[in-house]
Image (tube, rainbow, N blue to C red):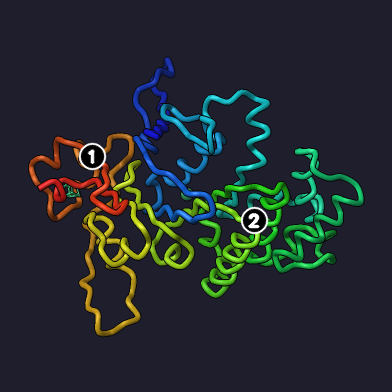
Amino acid sequence: KNLVKHFPIKGGILGRTIGAVKAVDGVNFFIREGETLGLVGESGCGKSTTGRVILRLLEATAGEVWFRDKNVLELGKEEMRALRREMQIIFQDPYASLNPRMTVGNIIGEAMEIHGLARGKEKEERVIELLETVGLTAQHMRRYPHEFSGGQRQRIGIARALAVDPSLIICDEPVSALDVSIQAQVINLMQDLQEEFGLTYLFIAHDLSVVKHISNRVAVMYLGKIVELADKEELYRNPQHPYTQALLSAIPIPDPTIKRERIILEGDVPSPVNPPSGCHFHTRCKYCMDICKVEDPVFKDYGGEHFVACHLLER
Ligand code: SF4
Ligand code: MG
């Protein structure tokens, strides 16, 4: 709810705050239990920061994060510890997120121990079970991360997240670093696991083709704000925001009878330090009107939970 994360910029010889990177600039959405919400946008739009703020790996500047009946941002240390088990993250880069000096068995087992879930023989059995669940074997337990391929490492990352029996997993571009041929395997695995364990996913990606298969609903983010959010079918068939339309036009359509014009966005994403006034997208939008330069469009439901932030829809 109205989630904000600004990173202060210090400068000058006094190290005073001279500005802020407005990474997340007032974001609103909900995720239903058991669903996958895809969160898509170009790099630097604030999607990873949103994920980290939800988990309190970064402290929010303002806003609320509700998990069931608790505002996560107000919880004390003890309550937060218990909640950490429920909310896990899978990182983009399985190379960087696994400790190279620990065996795979220890990496997965560590989380169980921290949360007091299992130890000794029981822990070992659980680790083996988890390895098998993600398509690895008991023999892999005593090996080190560097002995595995990228896809296998991401499977280890997934097993580590599952080790504490979470309900929500923030998947921060889990397949972006993988070969295209491996991406589908990992996404399929994640879908199977979701069904088996009743998981809820916030699935972050930088393009709409990656989340198409796995998402129930999709949110599109631009420069710290969500500009459109809808049911997956609706968003791909009937995109309303000019930015979503541009992103979608970049995806090849398998059906040759459908013609879609490729929309090329001019210029780069502006800096989040000084985002454009009014609608953040106005510097690149071909429909830009006078009002767009001064007034930030309200993100609202135009029917059937199809949320859009654009002045075009107000007319
Ligand atoms: Fe374009 Fe205006 Fe809509 Fe922003 S509010 S996307 S500038 S038409
Ligand atoms: Mg990122």
Determine if the C-beta at disc 2 is less than 8 A from ligand 2: no
Q: Residues within 10 Å of mark 1 (few under 14, many from 20)?
A: some
Residue depth check, mark 2 versus mark 1: number of the one nearer the observer: 1
Give the percent coordinates (x, y) of residue 90: 60, 51
Give the percent coordinates (x, y) of residue 129: 79, 61
In screen coordinates, is 103 left or right of 239?
right
Q: Earlier along the polypeptide chain: callout 2 or callout 1? A: 2
Which structural element holds mark 1? Answer: loop
- Between 281 and 271, the residue placed more toward the observer is 281
Give the percent coordinates (x, y) of residue 86: 63, 42
What residue is shown at x 16% (from left), y 36% (from top)? 295
Give the percent coordinates (x, y) of residue 190: 59, 62
In screen coordinates, is 215 left or right of 148?
left
Q: Quadrant of the N terminus?
A: top left
The mark found on residue 90 in the picture is none
- Between 313 and 55, the residue placed more toward the observer is 313
What residue is shown at x 39% (from left), y 32% (from top)? 4
Quarter occupied by residue 159: bottom right
Residue ranking furthest to the top: 14
What residue is shown at x 16% (from left), y 50% (from top)? 313
Which structural element holds mark 2? Answer: helix
Please say if 224 is above or below 302: above
Which residue in the structure is indicated by mark 1?
A: 298
Please say if 80 is above or below 149: above
Which residue in the structure is indicated by mark 2?
A: 95
Amino acid beneath label 1: Val
Amino acid beneath label 2: Tyr
- Between 294 and 190, the residue placed more toward the observer is 190
